[in-house]
Image (cartoon, grey):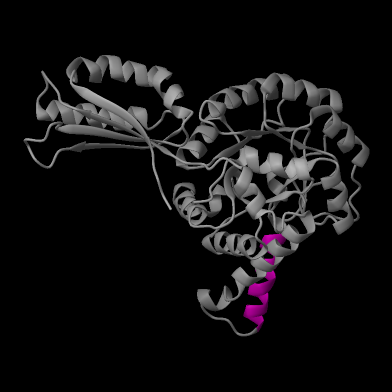
Amino acid sequence: MPLVHMRDMLQHAHRNRYAVGAFDLVSLEFLEAIMAGAEAARAPVILSLAESHFEYFDFELAMAATVAAARRASVPVAIHLDHGEHFDSAVRGINLGCNGVMIDASHHPLEENIALTRQVVEMAHACGVPVEGELGYVPGVEGEDAERHPGDVVYTSVEDAKRYVDETGVDFLAVSIGTVHGRMKGEPKLDFDRLAEIDAALGIPLVIHGGTGLSDEQFRRLIERGVTKINYYTALADAAGRRMQDNAGNDARSYTDFTRGVRDAIREEVVRCIELWGSAGQADAVLDTAERWEPVEHVILYNVEGLTDEDVEEMMAEGRRVLSKIPGVLRVGTGQAVKEDAQYRFCWLVTFCHPAVIDSYRDHPDHRRFADERFRPYAGGRVSIDYRMIED
């Protein structure tokens, strides 16, 4: 079960000067191909789902498949919400299984960007989840992602970056030094000196968005100057598109005809990037040093006094609705004993994404209100235990 803490994964990469690929997925073909590439190269990998791509898939269903793929992998995996637009986006991503989130408030003035990012950091850190922020602005030029990022480039300044990190507490910073979302036109001109100054001033993993179209030498120079996470999508989509065009030229007629070989095309590009960015062969080293990302089961066994069975059902339904919205809560289950003579007739089974949630959940105002007003007055005899599940 090598789903690992993204903070540890990227800190290992930062110390050893290589970059981890954060490959955006938009379908099951992408998910399977990215994982196949990472496994083939024995590399840590970040499975990235961008809010700007939600029109292509159902986020909740895609997350279920992504979590399943991560948990059966033999290489270290993190799951990241890319370009989260709001505080609620970050909460939803965490509660569906993301163990890293990005809040993209880069289009706001600096003060607003800092305020919104700080709010997300406080919430996510209480769940054990690291946060990526963005300072400066990476525009779009050409391609399916370009229209989602209109406007002109705004370069990240060293002074603003230092203030932003100090005041928000972000774990990783996406910087703007001349890359673009989508496909580049012409030779990209990157400000490597600016990047080196930011790296020296911050000392945290830096992130590049808009990596498609850069040369091998440019990637190497980025990584030498602190870039530790590279977001990558357009080139994967283009590789898939070319394979489908080839299939169309070979008289493809059905969906499976058109998509034949798409996984292989995406996997080949993933492996090429992994090898270029230096993460190939790093899987075991990351597994040796990174904290495993393991959920916690919060179990409550209880009996009730002063409530009918119908009252208990209403109370449990309200609890499922209220408690499931608390940051870091993956699932809320309720149950009733099969045998009427059981020592405890009812139970709660609440799954936390990380042990940090034990404290933040206990102190969350929605939990305190529900527990004090709707649960504890009627459940005097109860047992509460937090379990870390043991899995192969």
Q: Is residue 215 left or right of residue 71?
A: right
- The quarter of the picture where residue 303 lies is top left
Q: Residue at x 79, y 59 (%)?
A: 276
Q: Is residue 67 visible?
A: yes
Q: Residue at x 56, y 27 (%)?
A: 125
Instruction: Report x, y in % for residue 252.
Output: 58, 81
Q: Residue at x 60, y 26 (%)?
A: 121
Count of residue discs: 0
Q: Residue furthest left?
A: 341
Check the image and report above or below for 232 versus 321.
below
Q: Residue at x 75, y 33 (%)?
A: 204
Which segment did they paint magenta?
Answer: 235-249
Check the image and report above or below for 288 versus 324.
below
Instruction: Report x, y in % for residue 19.
Output: 75, 48
Q: Nearer the viewer, residue 83 or 294?
A: 294
Q: Is residue 112 visible?
A: no
Q: Within the magenta stretch, is there residue 138?
A: no
Instruction: Report x, y in % for residue 218.
Output: 88, 52
Q: Within the magenta stretch, is there residue 240?
A: yes
Q: Is residue 310 left or right of residue 222?
A: left
Instruction: Report x, y in % for residue 350.
Output: 34, 34
The prevailing secondary structure element of the residues shown in magenta is helix
Q: Residue furthest bottom?
A: 251
Q: Nearer the viewer, residue 366 or 129?
A: 129
